[in-house]
Image (cartoon, rainbow, N blue to C red):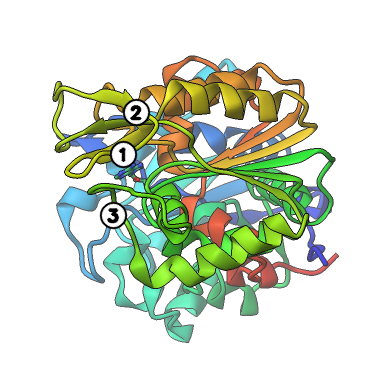
Amino acid sequence: MPHSFRSLRDLPSQPGRVLVRADFNVPLDHGRVSDDTRIRETLPTLAALHAKGARVILCSHLGRPKGKPDPRYSLRPVAERLSRLLSEHLGRDVPVGFCPVTVGLEAEEMSQSLEPGGFLLLENLRFQPGEEANDPEFARQLAQLADVYINDAFGSAHRAHASTVGITRHLPLALAGRLMEKELQYLGRALHTPEHPYVVILGGAKISDKIPVLASLARQADVILIGGAMAYTFLAAQGIAIGDSLFEPEQTATARDLLQQSQAGKFQLLLPVDHVVAPRLAPGVKSEIVTEIPAGQKALDIGPQTRSLYASALAGARMILWNGPMGVFEVPPFDQGTLAVAQAVAATPAVSIVGGGDSVAAVHAVHLADRMSHISTGGGASLEYLSGAVLPGVAALTPA
Ligand code: AMP
């Protein structure tokens, strides 16, 4: 059953100091934020807190600085970008203070002197070894900065760290932010109460990474479309020649089991019927469309017949969940299958949920992001959630 938790609606009318765990793990290029999607995603929560006069203290991790300060991973550039985005969003100048330490005296003084409606961003949580170790003392020091805790970092909810789990022991209220709530609503629906026909599209490199998700979603799905390298383990399991395509021999038993379930009528499992092949993976390499993969060739994308087959399967769906690319999306022309699936998903009136870096990038590349019902921000967290696991950061929220 989905776990019920408290949210921003349960925020006291005089919220005081609110510590928000955000996911500001953004890409930086020469000290500038090169993609601010994750920062933008937190604006609804931050605007709601601002409207209530909360004094907002923000914390996040960025990269993997391994428990000590490393200027390459400073969150300072995020404070600047957040200030600009909040100012645009709220239509007035909104400064975001930056605290050069994560916890301690300076952080306490800066959090105490925040005005109602003001914002302060703490330095990278992972500059402190206590963060990933979920150290109780570090969690207590963080908690000391605030009266209420809000978790809006769905992408980190599968990790039991001080800022996602430990801190909740030290504050009376641990609420889900708007983004966290939205993620859990959509993914919860995909996992427990999907609309039917329900089509699941899974792609990407490895079956082994996606087996728990496949097994869990197979209970609800009416149709499963397989693409990406994982398709070749399914084909090999049926004795079909796959040339030099990626293949996980130790996963053939699992693939056979899913094929059997599909033969028994539990769901329909569709595999590629044609492929884009090349002798090796390189940009501009000569490729060919085949229905049988010749020896010495690698299948790097689903072919045009498969794209139409999958588009027809999607056309009647009322709910669609998509994770993982249909081919080597990073290297054209092997991106075409993934782009075609993005278009096919957008063309349906179904509730559509997209997760995973490449599938999300594909939806953006064809400018169809606003046609999706929900684009998940947390790759690893969404896969764990969809496999039925209880995420520690969600379990730690105050129950409703
Ligand atoms: P994942 O992280 O599991 O979603 O996998 C994404 C990766 O799968 C991307 O880097 C793709 O290049 C890779 N991929 C997808 N299809 C293929 C394929 N047919 N052969 C090799 N790699 C693939």
The residue positioned 69% from the left and 49% from the top of the image is 187
Is 60 in front, or is 269? 269
Density class for disc 1 (Cα within 10 Å; few <14, some 14-19, many ≥20) is many
Please report contact status of discs 2 and 1: CB closer than 8 Å, yes or no: yes
**Amino acid, disc 1:** Ile
Task: For mark 1, give the secondary structure.
Answer: loop
Q: Quadrant of the N terminus?
A: bottom right
Residue 108 spot, x, y in % from top left: 44, 63
Q: Residues within 10 Å of mark 3 (few under 14, many from 20)?
A: some
* Marks 1 and 3, the one that precedes in the sequence: 3
Q: Secondary structure at mark 2?
A: strand
- The answer to which image quadrant residue 51 occupies is top right
Q: Is 291 on the left-hand or right-hand side of 384?
A: left
Lateral position of residue 213 relative to residue 272, left or right: right
The CA distance from mark 1 to mark 3 is 40 Å
214 to 224, vertically: above or below: below
Q: Quadrant of the C terminus?
A: bottom right
Up the image or down, 104 lies above or below 58; here it is: below
> Is 343 situated above or below 183?
above
Q: Nearer the viewer, mark 2 or mark 3?
A: 2
Sequence-earlier tag: 2 or 3:
3
* Residue appearing at x 47%, y 35% in the figure: 359
Say few, some or many: other residues with alpha carbon within 10 Å of mark 2 (under 14 / 14 to 19 / 20 or more). Answer: some
Write down the residue under mark 2: 290
Query: Circle 3 sits on which residue?
Result: 63
Is 43 situated above or below 188? above
* Label 2 to label 1: alpha-carbon separation: 6 Å
* Amino acid at dot 3: Gly
Q: Amino acid at mark 2?
A: Val
Q: Would residue 240 be found to the left or right of residue 174 on screen?
A: left
Image quadrant assignment for residue 347? top right
Which numbered tag is attached to residue 293? 1
